[in-house]
Image (spheres, grey):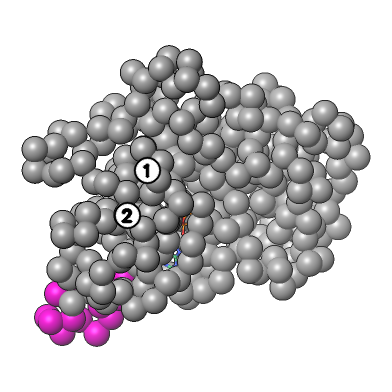
Amino acid sequence: MNEMSLTGRASDLTCFAFAPAAAAFRPVSPRRSGDLPEVLGGRYRIERLLGVGGMGAVYRARDLLREQFGDPEPYVALKTLSTEFAEYPDAHALLYSEFALASRLSHRHVVRLFGFEVDTPSQHAFIVQELLEGPTLDQLLDEHPQGLPWADCQSIALPLLEALAYSHGCGVLHGDLKPGNVILADDGLRLFDYGLGQSVAGRLPGLPRLCRSRIAAWTPRYAAPELLDGAPLSVATDIYALACLLYELSAGSHPFRRVDGRQAQNIGLDRILQRPAHLPSRCWPALRTALAFDPAKRRIDAVELLAVFSASSSRLRRWLCLSHG
Ligand SMILES: Nc1ncnc2c1ncn2[C@@H]1O[C@H](COP(=O)(O)OP(=O)(O)O)[C@@H](O)[C@H]1O
Ligand SMILES: [Mg+2]
């Protein structure tokens, strides 16, 4: 990034995410995760690290307040900024933006956020969210290098598409759909990590809209080509990422050999794209459309994908018709 782009976009910045309450808060200065106190916010006792991503370090913690009132399950997950990421000037605004967006969502397949807090003595900002226990799709794919049988693939695709259709319906773009941001929790799938999310242009006024040019804000293999060329997030960029994920679940490998969309387009990898063996042929045209490099040709949304993926197979339909009259 050069200085020009920094200055040029400065008016878009929302590093002031804390600003309305500004007087109460000193601007939160970046801290190292290693400095994390044992109890955050006077209430959450850190038990262990659950995972680290590009932005956050997520810890399992006990809510001492809930415990005091006899709650048998006082466990939560706390998302703080990872050591490296905390160095970015916008980091805390980005964490707040994640909270502001995702806390508007209420869906059984979207992670539930409880609060955004700052531990005043240590100046650590954190999100309090439901604790999810189970493997991420990344871990699942490691165990299934050939992909999942259709029934298993479908049982993941449907709740995931439901979650995304719901988010888009609420005007919320996820911005970083990938296997590592989906967890198969004990009580069902959850889409989480709206850290790079944004509101759909023109929707949800008043929410922070961060200047993405200050942060390399995507995961290359799931980033639509236009995103890599500087286009903003859109429903279509989420659809591309989700289509890569769905393909991967079914085939066991990334549709474009794990290269980013721009490289894949340049090499013409879409011309040799094949239907994964486990994927019913009736789903392939829809998934193929969702994988289009050209956003103008990616003419499908999560609701339409959901309809295609949930339709029962014709054999099953025939059997149901025969046996039920
Ligand atoms: N609510 C949660 N419950 C349990 N583990 C979680 C939860 N949220 C995140 N994690 C774990 O922490 C990791 C990093 O979290 P994530 O929100 O994806 O951070 P980042 O924005 O850095 O990618 C995840 O891959 C997952 O293993
Ligand atoms: Mg993540």
Judge whether residue 298 is colored magenta. Answer: no
Question: At 29% from the left edge and 27% from the top edge, which residue is drawn?
Answer: 205
Magenta part of the chain: 65-76
Picture quarter with the C terminus: bottom right
Q: Which residue is mark 2?
A: 31
Above or below, 295 relative to 48: above
Question: At 18% from the left edge and 77% from the top edge, which residue is drawn?
Answer: 64
Q: Could you give the CA–CA distance between mark 1 and mark 2, rounded to whole angstroms?
A: 11 Å
Above or below, 102 relative to 264: below
Confirm whether residue 211 shows in the render: yes
Instruction: First in sequence, mark 1 or 2: give its number.
Output: 2
Name the foreground residue: 224 vs 277.
Answer: 224
Above or below, 318 relative to 285: below
Tell me the SS state at disc 2: loop
Picture quarter with the N terminus: top right
Query: Left or right: 318 with respect to 157?
Result: right
Q: Which disc number belongs to residue 91?
A: 1
Name the foreground residue: 47 vs 270.
Answer: 47
Query: Left or right: 173 with respect to 14?
Result: right
